[in-house]
Amino acid sequence: VRQSAGSQVARHALWGCRFLAPPRPMVLASCRSRLALFAALLAALLPASPGEEEPSGEVGDDSWSRLTTDDWQPGRVGEFNTTFPIKDMECLGPETAIRFNAGLDWATVKAALHLSLGQLATDTWLFQVVAKIQRDEPDTCVLGITTTSSFLLPVTMPKFRNMARMLNTDHNLLVLNVTFYDSLRSGFPVFGVLDSLATPEFRAWFATEEGLSFFPSRPTTKACESPVASALREAVDRGRTSDEPEAWQPPLHLATALFSSGEAGLVGCSGAGWCAPAEAAALLVWALALARRPGTDGPAARAEGGLSGTSEAVSRAETLIRSHGWDEGVPFGQLVATPWNLWWLLHRLQLELPPLVDGIGFEGIGSSSASAGRQEL
């Protein structure tokens, strides 16, 4: 890492090697490569001092190549996903275009979905469009069909037990053969829709007698209740419940402390117990901080550095979330209701990506073209 960062960052990097471990039993990378990831993320977040040159060494030049040379690769989604290849995830091409209305495109639908998260009943136009998409459209635009179907769940499955069971089956995002990062870049607010389903009432239902009859309570590891993990969870929750979530600052110090203190990651290496959702949340906080990192060398340099670190952090977080679901047997309905607000973090990250990526798949929330298309309809 940068020499100007001081001994504190070096200490964080060393702790990162020990505690930034892959989920059990999936041994995806060596501790050496995890040190490279941890150090590269920290280095990307720390501005260089004037006149400072990048140090050479194990995690110096071209660390991105080193991060992607071992067996683990971003985008590997495990053996439980579908095998059907998903192309044109942004749904911009003619093969995935909306068919029931030639004057409507997916960009307009994406923008409307972003603006109406959790407010389906207040937008009659969007409700009619989404209902027609579910009734008339083929499954060629996979993320479009998935997002709109989940968006309708409060209407089609108003009882929490049915909504939770549907999330475990037909609406289980983890069975799609598409990575989280590609879902972010598609522009479809699939993570925002999932987060909007996690209302206080839905979360509380899992602790009721009816909820426990379908989803027995699960023991909480000590790592998930550690002081640092609890502080991180509370900080993220404050952002989610804030009146101005866009002004929320990612608690990077807590995300870093989660690994450097060893309270959450001790398990990852020792096998004594661990907290996958806490570590995933910490990685997503890092990803947000990288996406928001002010550029000192112009937009191109900012995009290159921000995207490489962001995609890596998101991919590692995805691995942890999938392992938490598949390996630890957590039903997807409970994952949606997680108090760690993972889907909210992913949605906030999606909103940060457009300035970094050209042609991300949607032209921006409330963009003039999307608004004009809606008015024309």
Image: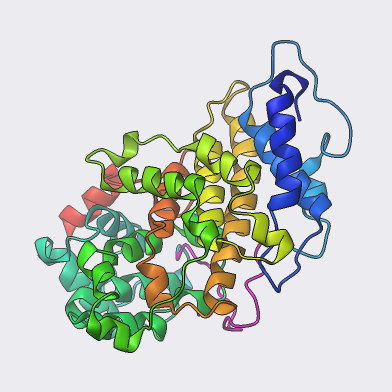
Residue in the picture at 41% in, 34% down = 249
62 or 105: nearer the eye?
A: 62
Q: Position of residue 176 (x, y in %)?
A: 52, 77
Image mark count: 0
Looking at this view, name the residue that lies furthest to the bottom: 213
Q: Position of residue 179 (x, y in %)?
A: 57, 65
Figure quadrant of residue 116: bottom left
361 or 43: nearer the eye?
A: 43
Residue in the picture at 73% in, 33% down = 11
Over which residues does the magenta segment extend? Answer: 73-91
Is residue 275 visible to us here? yes
Looking at this view, name the residue that lies furthest to the top: 50
Figure quadrant of residue 83: bottom right
Q: Position of residue 250 (x, y in %)?
A: 45, 38
Figure quadrant of residue 3: top right
Looking at this view, name the residue that lies furthest to the right: 57
Is residue 103 visible to us here? no
Q: Position of residue 18 (x, y in %)?
A: 75, 50
Q: How is the image coloured?
A: rainbow
**Is residue 74 covered in magenta?**
yes
**Is residue 133 covered in magenta?**
no
82 or 89: nearer the eye?
A: 82
34 or 274: nearer the eye?
A: 274
Residue in the picture at 79% in, 42% down = 63
Residue in the picture at 73% in, 18% down = 4
Instruction: State which quarter of the image contains the C terminus.
Output: bottom left
Judge left or right: residue 229 versus residue 333. Answer: right
Q: Main secondary structure of the magenta part?
A: loop
Is 42 above or below relative to 67? above
Instruction: State which quarter of the image contains the N terminus.
Output: top right
